[in-house]
Image (spheres, grey):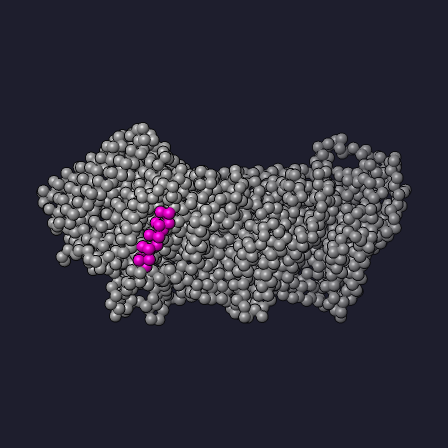
Amino acid sequence: MEALQTLSWSDTWYLAPELVLSGFAILLVILDLLLPKRINRNVIGWLTLVGLLVSATFVVLLMLSLGDGTDPADSTPEFYSLLGGSYRIDDFGNLLKLVFLGASFFIVFSSLGTVRDTDVPVKAELYYLVLPAALGAMVMSSSGDLITLFVGLELLSITTYILVATRKRNRLSSEAAFKYVVMGGVASAFILYGMSFLYGLTGGTNFAFIAQGLGSAIENFEALLYICFFLMIAGFAVKLALAPFHVWAADVYQGAPTPVTAFLAVVAKGAAFAMLYRIFMNSAFLTPADGSFLQKDVFIALSVLAAAAMIVGTVGALRQKNVKRLLALSGVANAGILLTPLAINLTEMHASLFSEFIYFLIAYSFMNIGAFSVLTILTRDSGNESISGFAGLYHRAPWTAVAMTILLCSLAGLPVTGGFMGKLLILFGTFQTHTYWLGAVILVTTVISYAVYFSFIRQMFMRSGTVDAKLKMSVPATITIWVCTIVTLVLGFMPVPLLEGIDHIFSIPADLLVIQG
Amino acid sequence: MLDNLPVLSLIAFTPLIGALIVLLLPGARSNWLRATAIIFTLIPLVLVLLLFAVYEPATGGGVYTEHSTWLTIPLNKEVLDMKLQGGVASFNLAFDYHLAVDGISMPLLLLTGIVSTMSVLASVHIRKRWKTYYVLFLLLLTGIYGVFLARDLILFFIFFEVTLIPMFFLIGIWGYYGREKAATRFLLYNGLGSAAMLISFLILIVTLGFSVSEGSNFLYSANYDVLLGNLSDPNALANIDTGNSRYFGFFLSDNARWGAFVLLLIAFGIKVPIFPFHTWMLRVHTEAPPAIVMIHSGILLKMGVYGLIRFAAFLFPEQLQSWTTVLAVLGVINILYGAILACVQREFKLVLAYSSISHMGIVLLGIASLEEVGLQGAIYQSVSHGLISALLFLIVGSIYERTNSTNLSDLGGLAKAVPFMSGILLIAGLASLGLPGLSGFVGEFLSFLGLFGSMKILTAIGVLGILFAAVYVLRSILSITYGPLPERFAEMKDARFIEALPMITLAALIVLLGVYPSILTDLMQNGFNGLLEQIQTRMGG
Amino acid sequence: MSMLSSYLTLAAVLFCIGLFGVLTKRNAIIVLLSIELMLNAVNLNLIAFSKYGVNPSIAGHIFSLFTITVAAAEAAVGIAVLIVLYRSRATVNVDEFDELRR
Amino acid sequence: MSTFFAQYAWLVPVFPFAAFAILTAMGKGMSKTGAWIGTIATFASLVLSLCIATERLSGNAEDYSNQFTWIEIGNLKLHAGFEVTNLSTMMLVVVTLVGFLVNLYSQGYMKKDERISTFFAYVALFTSSMLALVLSDNLLTFYIFWELVGVCSFLLVGFWYQKPEARAAAKKAFIVTRIGDLGLLIALLLLFWYMPGHALDFTTIHNVFDSQGGGAISTGITTLIALLIFLGAVGKSGQFPLHVWLPDAMEGPTPISALIHAATMVAAGVFLVARTFDIFDASQVAMTTVAIVGAFTAIFAATIGLAQNDIKRILAYSTVSQLGYMMLALGVGSVTGAMFHLLTHAFFKALLFLGAGSVIHSVHTQDIREMGGLGGKMKITAWTFGIGALALSGIPPFSGFWSKDAILTAALDKQPILFVVGIIAAFFTALYMARLFFLVFVGKQREGQHAKESPSVMTIPLIVLAILATVAGFVETPFNGWFGHWLTGGDAEHHASGLVMVVSAAVGLLGLYIGWLMYVKGTIRRDAVSSRMPGLVTVLERKYYIDELYQWLFVKPLQGFGKALELFDEYVVDGIVRLSGYSVSALGRLNSRLQNGQVQTYALTAIIGIVILIVAIAGRRFW
């Protein structure tokens, strides 16, 4: 173990995205305090967007500065390791950070002008709290150490607890927040408890250490390792809302303000996946495969959870009438799909798990944010969160209905949309590894989900609503909807550029496995 | 003149362009919308007809293949790289943009062109939301043409799915009372079929589609021709059993073959539909607007037939061969089940729906024969049934518009009030019951002829179906057109020109195909060579 | 090693008690406290491992410090949320917080 | 000899088809002209047929055939073509002649119908198909036109479509004959697969099944094929048990009954058996079946004919009975006898029907009990009808006598029992004809009936046919076997048998005499039988309850089965679909039960979930 590496000034460049976010967060808190009441808090929203953009710019710059490892003569490092390996700037983290920042950006952007003061009296908080939450997610995706990971996780969790509760006058909001706190707390405790064993059995919190220690740990304490992994799985399952750990999600999504719901569905979920990849690819995956079933079993458990999530999420959504709850359950199902590439493991023939995952995550983010934006507009208009609020949307706003239809098709995995391509890639992975049953589960639940998503379409196109007036659209939300729709279509028609880009910069040894310490 | 044009792409995508143009037109101008839709339905028809004119069965239309790579998805090769010392140059998953025509798809393309044109003319009965209607209609057409043209599994799948969504809307918005349920049922049922199909396709791609080319380029290909080539290549990885290696499992074991085959059978069986997967289509037949049922019954069901032949038969000749009896039994069940049920229906549309089931059974018999006669018969019967049911539903639409009912007990004596339509209806009915001289007979005869060589008793039982066909056709059509005319229909007007035109065209085509079948059979001449050779060699070995 | 196993057992018991509390207690405050209990079990584990573990190291101490801090933050937010909730419901009974359902 | 006209034989069906096409295309606008177009076209066919016949009358003209490939699939070829033989020439002449006369007659009979051009279009289509059928050189082409004549028959039976009875009769005609068609179709399939080279043409069939064929096809299959072909003939020619459609078909206009349901189409079954006679000849079982069915039908239908009151139905049963005779002839191996009877029957039965039509045209009823004494008013009709009746009853020297005699002689040669049956049937025939004739034309005239003779356009055909019915028999008498020789090319198979001639003439006369006694003289009371055996008469009147039997045996069970199947479809097949739908949404309901709002339940679910997961996945390793 090398000497403790302290934070030097040069490291701030590597940490620039995170530092920008925290700086903006602090700045905006102060600004919110100082600004007179009469000033519209949308200013803070715009500033939040600026913060997110600046941070994203730094991420891109960092990415460009990283080598891709294809040319051996190229001495540019493929990743930067900071603070004794506890923080890593690599392409895994950077790609995810871009997703998180982009998603946060669009969520905040579309909520500008649609969130009402009567609903969220502390609108400024709604905006600037997104920053620390995104920061937490970024820390999680960049961490190379259990402690960093945990801190990031808690930063994200605690901020989202507050975000959920921002509809202060709403009875449901605080109830949702409370439930979220309890479930989140329990989940954290489980994860931590599991981590403590991982630390104890290998002697380090750094992934490199853990990898080294696993060999002897599995010989002497196989049962304890099992317990350790399953405890973590339980914790993550709650965070990811995999079935049967998902029940809280519907309640929390319903109680939270719609933008926050979108944030939970996209960023919080994505961050949890980042953590999952970091931990499992650097621990369970590295346990010796011969002589012990541990590796196999952990991944089987993940597959089972993925399948259960898909089934329960889809089937549960069938009977759901509240759109937010429905999208929560749909999120459960999608979490199952997102988990699949990891669950079928990294093998000789299946090494593209990360590109499958991130491609679908990107597609999922856009279609979800788009759908939530439509929902935001509709709920602002009628206050009706039920699916019948979509009735007659075709007559009130035909183009929005078309966009929503495309987004729903993507959610349902119908061609030619990003959702379809993403699912197809993940499916291909399951078939490559001959995990046919999981592929079949994906497909069958996808078909059942048609019933869910097309019930919206039925409402929009085949029923007439109670109101006939043209729907009042807010400009940012409209832009968001169309950006999401177009991106969804582009991802469906032209997946190759993105996938090639990912393939180009992403390398398993450097970005996913932390073997070199 | 076709040489310099990407004619197949034009066929597939002009409707899509039309859809976009319709989308931009003002919604209130129904005439503009209709004219645009008609034009963009006619363009592919004209192109298909031109293709038909220059198509040479001997070369199999190979000139008009369009092949380019569409998506080459990079798969991370690092782990593989580490394992193989020499390294891997590339590891890709390739979906090709590959369109082609041959003797099997050509007749169905013609059918699509004709029926879609008739259907767009028949869409005069559509009374609301024209713009959306025509957009979806044209979108549907792109899907259908694509299905018949695509030679890449994923491309095929995409086009197949693309037909689902517009159909859902077309049924759900413009249908009758139970439209929403019917639309949902349609979507879910067919979705399940597609899911089964995709499973099967993916199994094929990860085994048969895999190849290592010069310079260790690892490639999964979804191209149909590649698959077909690997299937008959004994050196292809899919045909070599390397033991139970988990990672390099490219071997397509017998179990996997059977699994994929049965899944394809289910997938396309739902579409055809094969008993017991038929209930969804009854609802579509009764609830969808007639112009759409023309497309559905006339073309969409044939996508199932096409898929069965193109994929289940060509890729799994061995499995098909050992299951011919199963297929034939299913066919016979379809024939008799559909026919007997058609005999007791009180709703004309249901009679037609069950009769479709019955007729599709004959197609199955043709496929089960695995004889060239039977296979051509199956396609012939598909085309013929497409024309006939399109014509029948065209008339159903016109009758419904005038009487607001298609219930047999509500109607009667229409021959008095609308002699022209009744006459056409009678022709269609007679064609449907397999009257020689009309197209239905040729298809049925060829299918029976094909199967009879191998399964005499089953065929003989199947032939009973044409007796029941006579019963249900006459029972229903005579109770509509013959008998005393009720007072309330006395003022009924006969077909307008816009209605009569497609009726006459379809009837004329039915007669033409009945009298001069070579027009299609010559087209199909070399279509089945590949399959039959496969079977031949397998039987030899 | 016997020391380690005793500590681990204690931690496990503590964790289970905490879990039991979360699952059964009606009072929301006690539920939150039970979560703290679970986190403390984790701390105990970490400390025990850092002293008696396979590879004793300082990392466990540091980890537990972070855990304690974060737990405090979490508890603060939890209580804050509970206060808001109490204002609108006038109760701290967990089983009465069931307006969000189905 | 030259085959100059024979090569143009394909034109014979083309003329009427052209007429059909013109009439259909022109539509309603041309009622009068339309009728003439049909008639002229048929006349053209007649002329050409006569030319061909003349060319061939010398007896040693070669058969002419010509064919083209209709469908070619792989190395299989399906041909279509025509063939001119003496047999087909005879049929050509019969069809065109009767067709022309009926056309002429219909000018008068259908004059007032507003759809007269449609009528003539249908008739033209029928004539065309029938001629093509006759000319077909192979079984497939034959089958195609076989079905087409069926459909024309259907159209014409249902010509007055607004009458529910006509609708029912048309439907019945089509469906019942289709049962037979199925047999023919399967026979066709069998032949296709068993014949060497998949040949279907009659010449090859002849060569293969000929005694020299060397048993290329096993006897079992031969029998099967023969029986299936015969099934087709049974359906078309109204033989028992598929005779039920023919009497009902009388709902059609009377000229149609004359043309289709007496002279031509119904004889197609006989023609079919004659055309494929070699197949039958190769199978004893088939021959016996044909003979028995024929004989049974002959007597069976004749008895029913005794108790009917509808003038056309009596004639219809008579047709059935006479077709039975023809089948009998074939069954006992006498193609000549069958074709000879076909020829004479075509003339006298057409005559009778047209005569009946003339009567109906005049008195507007078909019930013979409402007629009487029409002889005085309608002299030509009465005379010609009388000639027809005598011919039918087999009274020398009318044509029916000679042909019937040929059949009975052959039957006696083969199987005396069949001969006896034939004789009895002949007696009944004479009896019901006597009843018919006397009730209609003799006796008191009914009040209020203003019968008057039909116009000359209707009576001329009657006269022509009457002449033919009288003289046609002389082409083949026991003393002169010209016709048989010409037809089959063999030596005259028919040798004189004085016994048969005497017996058959005697029973014919006896029948007529008894009829005269009952219906004119009154010596025997009319209800002599009905009063003593009312049951028997009712059975006859109800046609042996065959219709009812079929209703209960086939129609009802089928309907019941259909209904049951409908329930099956709804509740089992679709039920399973719905059930799976419900069960999925029941799972969904289970999920929403879980969402009861209690956060502790959620946590508990999670804990239970992980415990199950551990036990299931990790546990199985440690077990």
Farthest left residue in view: C2
Asked if residue D253 lies left or right of residue D618, the reply is right
Segment tinted magenta in the rendering: A43-60
What is the total number of numbered labels drawn onto the structure image? 0
Answer whether residue B109 is visible to the viewer in this image: yes
- Asked if residue A362 lies in the magenta stretch, the reply is no
Q: Quadrant of residue A114?
A: top left
Farthest top residue in view: C90
- For this rendering, which residue is in front, B179 or A141? A141
State the quadrant of the C terminus of chain D.
top left
Q: Is residue D369 above or below residue B474?
A: above
Q: Position of residue D29 (x, y in %)?
A: 79, 52
Answer whether residue D61 is visible to the viewer in this image: no
The residue under the point 74% across, 63% down is D11
The residue under the point 73% across, 67% down is D7
Q: Quadrant of residue C34?
A: top left
Asked if residue A9 lies left or right of residue B176, the reply is left
- Asked if residue A57 lies in the magenta stretch, the reply is yes
- For this rendering, which residue is in front, A245 or D19? A245
Q: Main secondary structure of the magenta part?
A: helix
Q: Position of residue B217 (x, y in %)?
A: 34, 67
Q: Is residue A193 above or below residue A284?
A: above
- For this rendering, which residue is in front, D386 or A329? A329
Q: Position of residue A394 (x, y in %)?
A: 52, 45
Q: Position of residue D412 (x, y in %)?
A: 71, 51
State the quadrant of the N terminus of chain D.
bottom right
The residue under the point 42% across, 45% down is A113
- For this rendering, which residue is in front, A237 or D78? A237
Asked if residue D74 lies left or right of residue B503, the reply is left
The residue under the point 62% across, 54% down is B32
